[in-house]
Amino acid sequence: MNNDPTARRTQTFADPTALARAAAEELTRLAVAAVKSKGYVTVALSGGSTPKVLYGFLADEPAFRDRFPWAQTHFFFGDERHVAPDDKDSNFRMAKEAMFDKLAGTLPAENIHRVRSEGPDAVKVAADYAGEVAAFFDGKGGGSTGASSLPRFDVVLLGMGPDGHTASLFPGTTGLREMDTLVTSAWVDKFSTYRITFTPPLLRAGAVILFLVAGKDKTDVLATVLEGKSEPDRYPSQGISADGGETLWLIDTAAAARLKG
Ligand code: 6PG
């Protein structure tokens, strides 16, 4: 795990909208660069409120929509709720409505790799998605990290909850200790449900990890996560940074209020 704060950059923005706009710019820049160097780009999407604004910017604003390499982009989901794809809680549904539906004819349907979360058995749903991720990267002849055979997403988008969770890695849950699989299902007591989530090793293999964190309900936990003592089991987002890559925290002023650095 790379907990070296010097390998991490933080940028602060006036409000969630400015943050989402900066994230759209950064994601567009990274996608264009990846396509230029290898012909395609892989992006792991997250759920959450700020990403929704980001997805809207990408699909709606010509400044992004016209530059983004849609046809060469493969979208995956870093986590998903154990619900049908048309459920109001589905991360896929959120991304579909905010972004995919607006790109018919531009973004090929086969570039959208959703979690088949309608399956009744969360363990199987996670295993199947792990298989899809692995098969995609194998088919591309690797795209793996140097040190291991893990798939290396070009960009991993993440948020952070007020309890310090990220993706669907919640404090004290089993997913945090999954080191041998790419995707796992984890029971989340506080929501009485399973979530499907990338495991820490797959998240950390990302070339660039973009955390999007906004709102005053994140102020205290963000100060602990970025500047407090290391307790990744209690604050899962503390344990996620890009091994050998770049970790960028985009934060709004409300969430950043207690940061010293
Ligand atoms: C999800 C997420 C989750 C989210 C955080 C922050 O599926 O809900 O992927 O990890 O990013 O809960 O969400 P907000 O940005 O809405 O606060």
Image (cartoon, rainbow, N blue to C red):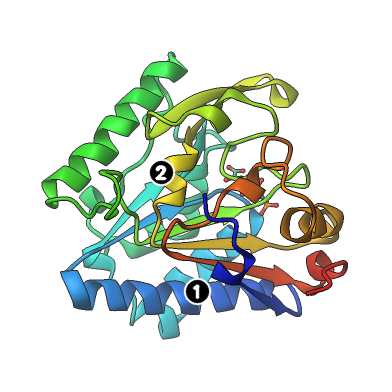
Q: Position of residue 230 (x, y in %)?
A: 72, 47
> Which is more N-terminal, label 2 or label 1?
1
Is residue 45 shown to the viewer in this render? yes
- Which-is-in-front pick, marks 1 and 2? 2
User: Which quadrant of the view contains residue 92?
Assistant: top left
Q: Secondary structure at mark 1?
A: helix
Mark 2: secondary structure:
helix
In the image, what residue type sits under mark 2? Leu
Ligand 1 lies under 8 Å from the Cβ of mark 1: no
Question: Residue 100's quadrant in the figure?
Answer: bottom left
Where residue 156 appears, x then y in whole percent? 45, 56
Q: The C terminus lies in which quarter of the figure?
A: bottom right
Nearer the observer, 157 or 7:
7
What amino acid type is highlighted by mark number 1? Answer: Ala
Residue most extreme to the bottom: 63
Where is residue 187 drawn, in percent x and y?
Answer: 60, 20
Q: Is residue 77 left or right of residue 10?
A: left
Q: How many marks?
A: 2
- Mark 2, residues whose alpha carbon is within 10 Å: few (<14), some, or many (≥20)? many
* Residue at the image point whose x is 21% and y is 48% from the top: 110
Above-or-below relation of 161 to 71: above
Residue matched to label 1: 24
Point out residue 204 in the picture as x, y percentages from the top left corner.
46, 50
